[in-house]
Image: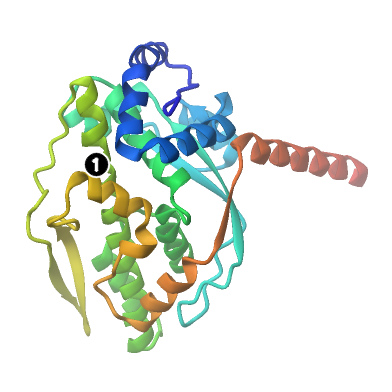
Amino acid sequence: MAIVYHGELPDLRREVARLKPVLDARYREILGDRRAAHLAREADRLLGPKSFYDSPKTWNRLVGDRLKDTDSNKLMIACIGDFKVAKDGTVTTDKIKTSPAFYISDNGFNASASSDFTERPIASYVHEYNHFATYALQQFPLYLASIAINDHLKINTHPINIVQYARQLLESDLSTRELSARVSLAIFSNSLTDFYERSNRVLDKLVLESIDINTPLDWRNQPRGFNTERVGPLLVQTNLYGDPFFGSSDQEVVDHTIKWEKYFTPTMTIPKVVKFLESIKSLSVGRIPIEKILKKAESQKKKKKKLKKRKR
């Protein structure tokens, strides 16, 4: 039972139930029996009805996030605790707890990249579920690394508009060295986002072809590169393109992504980036159901209400 869906969209529920035997067999083929069994256990442990939302208002009310009606479908990772990063880039947080949840809706499918190549909403859900699969199987979820960087830089967008961010920093009183270090971290965050999104599309291709959906990957086996733009004293990297897995088979991409700590090598040797990457690999990540976070949040709300009544 590798893939599950506990949301409220009736058509998607029927489609997942109908295709589940085929999809489960395909996940076992791609991941191997041991990893597929681990994914099934984590899905059973972490995902329930409270893990699926088809209304931004409901999610925003419960968690206080900023989902919009125009947002595409997505896997969201709620974090308990803060990522603390020292000036030299070292992550000083020892452990953090996380909870997965999905925003899956008809509007979300229409806004998703999957709708560009298929009319079947299950493709978009499989894409987000594949993000969950790597989150469950990676020792340290790579997705959290870009979240940690963006939290440190106080940026809320993925990917980061590097040119705009660099221009904002130039208006501050930061030294050129610190400006360069922060922009380098932002560029590194974008390279991480590009890595896990493209690797996820490779996994999409392998999974979706089993249910007769073709995932176009025009960038596969194209030379890797980027554009540059000068912003004040800084020459910043923009617009990553090409294949970060050039020369690797689709199966190798999946295997190497799961074991990214061993295979991912940043092209940047900026000390702050190197320190960040090496230290975050040892951070302990707990995975708990979203219900636990919601119950804790509700309990805290009730306590606050009691305190207000006592003050009156």
In percent of width and height, residue 41 lies at 53, 34
In percent of width and height, residue 69 lies at 39, 31
In percent of width and height, residue 133 lies at 41, 40
Residue marked by disc 1: 201
Residue 138 appearing in the image? yes
Q: Compared with residue 170, is residue 113 higher up or lower down, i.e. above or below? A: above
Quarter placement of the C terminus: top right
Q: Compared with residue 167, is residue 304 higher up or lower down, i.e. above or below? A: above
Q: Nearer the viewer, residue 247 or 55?
A: 247
> Given the image, on which type of amino acid does mark 1 rest?
Arg
What colour scheme does the image use? rainbow
283 relative to 216 in the view: left or right: right
Q: Nearer the viewer, residue 183 or 124?
A: 124
Neighbour tally class for label 1: few under 14, some 14-19, many 20 plus, Cα within 10 Å: some
Residue 66 appearing in the image? no
Question: Residue drawn at (27%, 55%), measured in percent from left and top?
Answer: 195
Q: Nearer the viewer, residue 271 or 173?
A: 271
Question: Residue drawn at (13%, 41%), measured in percent from left and top?
Answer: 217
In percent of width and height, residue 44 lies at 55, 29
Quarter placement of the N terminus: top left
- Label 1 secondary element: helix
User: Image quadrant of residue 262?
Assistant: bottom left
223 relative to 258 in the view: left or right: left
Question: Residue drawn at (57%, 42%), measured in percent from left and top?
Answer: 64
215 relative to 84 in the view: left or right: left
Q: Compared with residue 162, is residue 310 higher up or lower down, i.e. above or below? A: above
